[in-house]
Structure formats: structure tokens, C-alpha cells
Amino acid sequence: MSGEMLTGNLAAAWGARLADVDYVPSFPITPQTEIVEALAEWCERGEMAARFVTMDSEHSMMTAAGAAAATGARVFTATSSQGLLYAFELLYSIAGWRVPLVLVNVSRALAAPITLEPDHNDVLAARDSGFLQIHAETCQEVLDSVLMAYRIAEDPRVMLPVLVNLDGFYLSFTREPVVLPDPGKVRAFLPPYRPQHLGFKASAPQALGVAVLGGSTYSYFRHQMHLAACNALEVHQDAAAEFERLFGRRYDLVEGYRLDGAEDVLVMSNAFATKGKAAVDAARERGRRVGLLRLRVIRPWPAAAIAQALRGRRAVAVLDQNLAPGLGGILFQEIAAALYQEPFRPTALCSFIGGLGGKNISEAEFEAIFAQTEEAGRQGRGIGPVLLYTEGEHQEMEQLLDIAASRSK
Amino acid sequence: MPWQRETFKKIKQIPKEEYVLPGTPLCAGCGGLEALRLAAKVLGENVVYVNAAGCFTMLAVYPFTALNASWLYTTMGSAPAGAQGVRDALDVLIAKGRLAKEEDLKVVVLAGDGSTYDMALSSTSGAIFRNLDFYYICYDNEAYGNTGVQLSSSTPYGARTTTSPCSVQHPAGASQEKKDIFEIWRAHRPPYIATVSPRHPLDLAEKFARAARYAGPKLFLALSACPTGWYYDPAQSPEVAKLAVESGLWPLKEAIDGRVTHTYIPKRRPVEEYLKLQGRFRHLFEPARREDAIRHIQDAVDAYWQQAVTVESH
């Protein structure tokens, strides 16, 4: 594979650059900062025709981003973790404004305890905001997804903001070969943004984000958002086809990996899916008939594509890199709901929680997941949530607890 | 030399055009709405208001708006950041030739004191720091009004609100002093800051006209006499607003590049006359007169003017 060696962060920045955005409000947060650093430099050097501004918080940053998009500019911004949560109320507002902002989130686990490494509790907290969500596995996919995100967001059938997610550290700071799409072809894929219905101007005053009185008016607009989000399933597939035609790379709502003949299927998302795919290869060599389903578009929720990929399997294991305390894995719940109406649904649905705060998932753990899932399939009874934690990790933690206890005496 | 009005010398000079139209769901006698009505006459056409959560959010309720202007409701904490996004986008679109220059708008933040003094302090500070070219109008009724009159950091000492009730521990009501947002703004050195009162329409109009000469942040603190929150008859709003200024409690002033000028020197009627008009201060007079609290308020006003006169005479 040829291409530039780019980090996931730089791939995201290149996505914004190639999308020819007009405006980049920013705020630093690890591990996202490299994105806005690159964009600041490119804007400063005139390599991008965008205005770059450093805001006073993510809350302000997201407000400026949404307001500029509402004024008719093509806008890009990026954040992570605590920053996403600090901006949280704006996610709902901007989606309600129906403006096609693209936001990159670099996943990082949430405090407390405060940490830097990834899991998906940050991005999945935003799953009901009205932002559409695309979760990328590779640096190439990050760049390509930013371009697809603008096309989907700006489609008149959608007009909703899109969040593109990549994992902090594992992808944000990992260099991979990335093919930079030809700018001329990008313009064909993503024409210059000239919204007819949005924008504040003297000749046509408009009020946006106004109050409503009463549930029926409120419900009307919320229903509109839902229907528009559902439209994005079809619009995504249109965009995927056109993207493949122009650039030769294909991204579907979900990605199947070695699903042919797979009795049991492991469901994952984002960069850790690469580990999962390696584990599937290893398990296949040992004679296990397993495959992997990677979730890519998480909003809108591609229930039909998921059900189609999982129907008729013996057992399905969902490996959530997030934890809803007192419940378990977030995506497990949604997959269970997607499969419930399916007549040939798997006999066992298993829930595993792993990779929290960037914790590794070892080959042995993947093997244990496959073995337990197979057994659950044989028994016809799902298990979980199983919290992945190895003996070695447990011993290390014991040592830390001992140190903490002795210091406190 | 005393401050002199140059543009608005007579009341007839205030434009007759109305940009805040009748039929709003705001309270009768709202002093803030009158301040906005006067301000809008000077701002003229081609305005986009960026609104923070507060009473004035009710100025645009689907599918109606009382304003002959554009409107974007943002949040309680970030209207100045919304103004940044709108201003920057207008600039970029005009520079790139995607929007005609005639389509340009004045960007005006419209926020109450709860947003201004408390929640949006960070985003306001950021917008001034970035020298954003915008107007900021704070309609200051000294409490969280739209939620039913709770203590804000603009609430003056001695005022009763639903969350600063009179009690044995706090017989005077609010025990904190009103935050000096004017000085907080001034410390940022924006080109123009002013306090205004709708009871002084020429002073108000003149200040908006003067501010128009400056690019950058132009900040207005408008006294918003509030019959609902201050507990007086709506018909008395003009009198309450007048006494706020005449008692010296609401100084009319401006600061150009940080230099303060008082634009009206009141004869300073006793604060008691102002306090007595309002139910929020009634506990200072009934059932027993609270001389200590009234004295405290009068002393603060006296000290303010003593210092103001000293500074400006130098």
C-alpha cells in the first residue's frame, strides 16, 4: 500500500483540508490537539482558505462551530472526551438547528479516574444527540470518513451534523500509510457548499433555534430529526458507492470480516477491531469457525444490516469498549434489540466489556471470548456482561493497592 | 468638560422606525424590553441577535418573532461564542464572494444578567479577548427572572429573591454585593462599554451611536426595571428606572478604551426613595425599619460617587 505515513489525527486534519472547509473553531485537548495544531499551521500558511480561531472552551468552540454552520459556512472542529462532554448541550442544539457540521472526536475514557487513553463512553454518550456517528478503524478510514461525513451531512435529505470517531493513542498517534485523495476528485465527490436554506443575511432575516410552546410543536421537529437521521442510511450508501467509484475504496454501514461460514461472530468497533480481526485469523487457524462484524455507522443505527450479518449464527459476542455501570455494554443492548425480531436470531448473545481506558485485550482473552461464546452457543444461553481482566493485571493492581495502603499509614 | 451628546440632542431625533414590534409575551412594564426597543432604533436594519437563555428568549416563539431582525438562540453560557461563529462566518463568506457585502449584519448578543454575570463569563471574556466585532446588550434585572426571580450575582445587597429570602440569619435578604461586571469588562479593555437606562432615552441612543464608531466589542449594561421580580406595579417602571439613576445606584457612564466618563451626574436622591418603591426591599422598612441595611446601601453609593468624582477630576 502506498501513501503518506500519517497519524490518525493528521488523517482527520487532511480530511478537513481536502473538504475545503471555511472555518475551524478549536480548543486543545489530549489526544486531539495534533488535529488543530496541523489546521492552525495550514491556515496560517495559506494552504487552507479557512479562518482558524482558538476559543475559550469546548462549550464555546461548539457554539461557534454550530453558529457558523448556521450562517452558511462549511465548518470543521474536533475534540475528545471531557471536551465532548463539556460541549454536550450544544450537540443537541446544533443537531436541532439542522446544520451540517462535521466534528471529529478522538475517543478517550472519561474521568473519574482521570486518564488519557481510549474507550467509547465519551462518544457513545452523544449517541442520542442527533449527531450522526461514523466510527473509523484505520487512519485511511478517518480521512475518507470525514469526506463522506460532509457529503452525508449536507445532503438535503439529511441536514444533520456528523461525528467521526477515532480512538485516542491507538489510532490518533499511530502512523499508517494513507492515500491522500486527489483534490479534483474530492471536489467532484463533495461539491462546494452553497446552502440555499441556511444563513443569516440582510435580505432574508430568519430566526433559528427559537422556542416552542407545547409538546406537539416540539415533537414535530424531533420527529423530523429522526426521519432525517433514518434517511442517512440510504444517503450513506449513495455516498459509499460514489466514493468507491472515484477512489476505489468502499465503506459500508457495517464491515464483515471472514463472516463466510462463521458459526460465531464477534462484534467490535473502532481501532481495537484490528486486534479482533487478528484474533479471528488466529482462531480460524486453530479450526474455530468465527468471524467479526465491525460497527462503522452507529447513528443512524443500521439495524437491518446488523440483523442480516448476524442472522443464522450460532452465537454472537459483543465486545463493548464502554461500560454503562449497572447495565453492561451499551452496544450489546442495541444489538440485542436489533436481533429480537429476527426469526433466525442467534441462539446465544454474549456481552463482554474490554479495553476500558485503553486496556489491552490479549490474544488469550480473545481466545477465551471465542471459547465461552461457542459454549454459550452450544448451551443456547448467552452470558455476560463479562468484565475482561487478566490474572496478571489483577496482580499488578494488587501491588498498587499495597503501595497505596502502606503510604497511607 | 461635561459629557455631551452629539447625535441625539432632542427626543424627536430618535428614529421613529420600530424594530421591536408589539405583541411579545414579555411582562407588562418590562424595562429591559424598552431598553432594547430604543437600542434597536439606533442599531437600525440588518441585525442578527444571538440570544442566551433568559426572559428575552420568549421574543422568538415558533412561528412568531417580535423582532424585525435575524435571531439565533444558543445557550445560557455561550451566546458570545455564537456571535463569534456568526461574525466569522459572515466575514469569511463575504471575503470569499459567496455573500454580498450588502448582506452583512451587525451581530448583537442579547442576554440577561444571569447569563452575563454568571454563566457566560468565560465566553464573554473570550470574545472580548479575541476583539470580536459585536454588540453585547445585557438586560439587567438583577435576578434570574425567567425562572421566577432567583438570586444572581447581579442581585444587589438587601434584595429579596426566591433564593435569597429574608430569614433570621439574613434579615436583609441578599447578603452579597452586586458583582461589578462593568469593571470586569473594563479590565479586558474593549473599545466601548456603557451603562444605559430606558428612562434616559437620549443618553441610551447617543451611546449606541457612539459605539458604532468602534470595531470590536461594544458592551451595554441596560437597567431593566422588573415589575414581576421587583414587586411593584408595572405602571411604575419609568419612576423606578428614574430613581435608580437619580439615587446614584445606577450610574450612567461609558468607558472608551478603558477611560470612564459619567454621562449624567445625578443629584443623588436618598436611596431610600428608590428602595421604598419595590417589594423586593419592603423588608427593609416593614415591620421594622432596618437602618443598618439602608445605611449600608447608602454608604456604598456615596463611596462610589466620591471615588468616581475624584478619578474623573484628575
Image: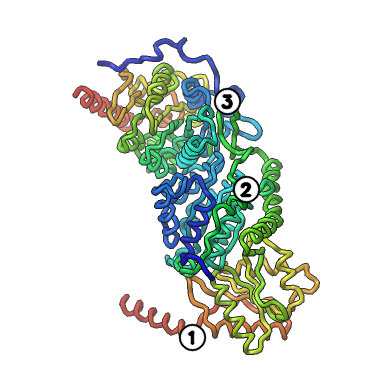
State how far apart marks 2 and 3 are (Cα): 29 Å
Determine crowd level at label 3: few under 14, some 14-19, many 20+ residues with C-alpha closer than 10 A.
some
Q: Quadrant of residue A98?
A: top right
Residue A133, placed above or below residue B8: below
Q: Secondary structure at mark 3?
A: loop
**Chain on which label 3 sits:** B
Mark 3 or 1, closer to the camera = 3
Residue A373, placed above or below residue A217: below
Residue position marked by numbered label 2 in the rendering:
A154
State how far apart marks 3 and 1 are (Cα): 69 Å
State how far apart marks 2 and 1 are (Cα): 49 Å
The amino acid marked with disc number 3 is Asn
The amino acid marked with disc number 2 is Glu
Quarter of the image where the N terminus of chain A is located: bottom right
* Residue that protrudes farthest toward the right in the picture: A343
Residue A73, placed above or below residue A305: above
Determine crowd level at label 1: few under 14, some 14-19, many 20+ residues with C-alpha closer than 10 A.
few
Establish whether labels 2 and 3 are both on one chain: no
Residue position marked by numbered label 1 in the rendering:
A391
Please state the total of marks drawn on the protein image.
3
Where residue B47 appears, as percent x and y from the top left, is 51, 28
Where residue B46 appears, as percent x and y from the top left, is 52, 26
In the rendered view, does B175 fall on the left or right side of A102? Answer: left
Residue position marked by numbered label 3 in the rendering:
B68
Where residue A122 appears, as percent x and y from the top left, is 52, 61
**Which of pointers 2 and 1 lies earlier in the amino acid sequence?**
2
The amino acid marked with disc number 1 is Glu
